[in-house]
Image: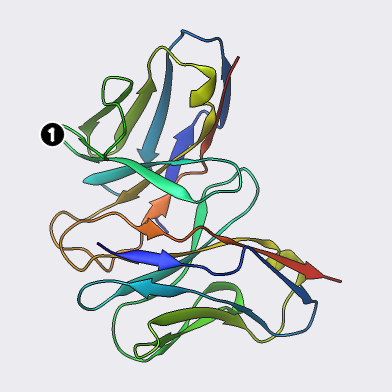
Amino acid sequence: GAVVSQHPSWVICKSGTSVKIECRSLDFQATTMFWYRQFPKQSLMLMATSNEGSKATYEQGVEKDKFLINHASLTLSTLTVTSAHPEDSSFYICSATQTRGPSYNSPLHFGNGTRLTVT
Amino acid sequence: AQSVAQPEDQVNVAEGNPLTVKCTYSVSGNPYLFWYVQYPNRGLQFLLKYITGDNLVKGSYGFEAEFNKSQTSFHLKKPSALVSDSALYFCAVRAPSGNTPLVFGKGTRLSVIA
């Protein structure tokens, strides 16, 4: 079945540094990837949608200059948290879907998430 | 805009008993509904989906869900719960227009007690 690999699974960084999270589709071409953020005991909140070869679309309230998303190939999307602060500590999850165009019935495949702790 | 409500934060059930995790939705047009399960510090695993067809949908690990259009519900069920079913369950809806993201409910924590 379709597999999405997310790396790293956890990371601890100092305040002010940047952290890059990778999301790879291992056995399919992910034309669209979604980045979610999950706070403890809360649901997943969509941060942005990235389509291969074009700029990401950010949800309202998400700072695009802080959360840089790059989707340069059909198998890789990256999320970079720039100048991280303790309030950015969270669980970040990527998901991917493999068809471009109307694909509303395709289940999204999720990575295992990245636990970011900023000290 | 579409939305999903999971009215219960926590559901407790004894092992071997049937379980139900509730979900109601709001969407313009025909809904595309999903259930996912999340184990601690892990991503989401797909359980089942409803797109069209039979109202009773069967999915992974013995789970099933019943689509009820008049009640705008999509409750997750399992005839006999296992301790290993204990996890966080999310109901989600997707708009039937293009390559859109899932919108999730807040999640329901299921605890199956031996």
Which is nearer the eye, B7 or B111? B7
Relative depth, front residue between A6 and A86: A86
Taking depth in this image into account, of A110 and A47 the one nearest to the observer is: A47
Say whether residue B67 is visible.
yes
**What residue appears at the point 26 percent right and 26 percent down from the top-left corner?**
A64
Going by the image, does B97 lie left or right of B10? left
Relative to B43, residue B63 above or below: below
* The C terminus of chain A: image quadrant: top right
Q: In the rendered image of this protein, does residue A26 appear above or below residue B23? A: above
Tell me the chain of label 1: A
Q: Position of residue B14 (x, y in %)?
A: 81, 77
Give me the residue at 23% from left, 78% from top.
B30
Q: Is residue A13 left or right of residue A29?
A: right
- The answer to which of A101 and A37 lies nearer the viewer is A37
Q: Secondary structure at mark 1?
A: loop
For label 1, the residue is: A54
Q: Position of residue A25 (x, y in %)?
A: 35, 43
Residue B82 horizontal side relative to residue A60, left or right: right
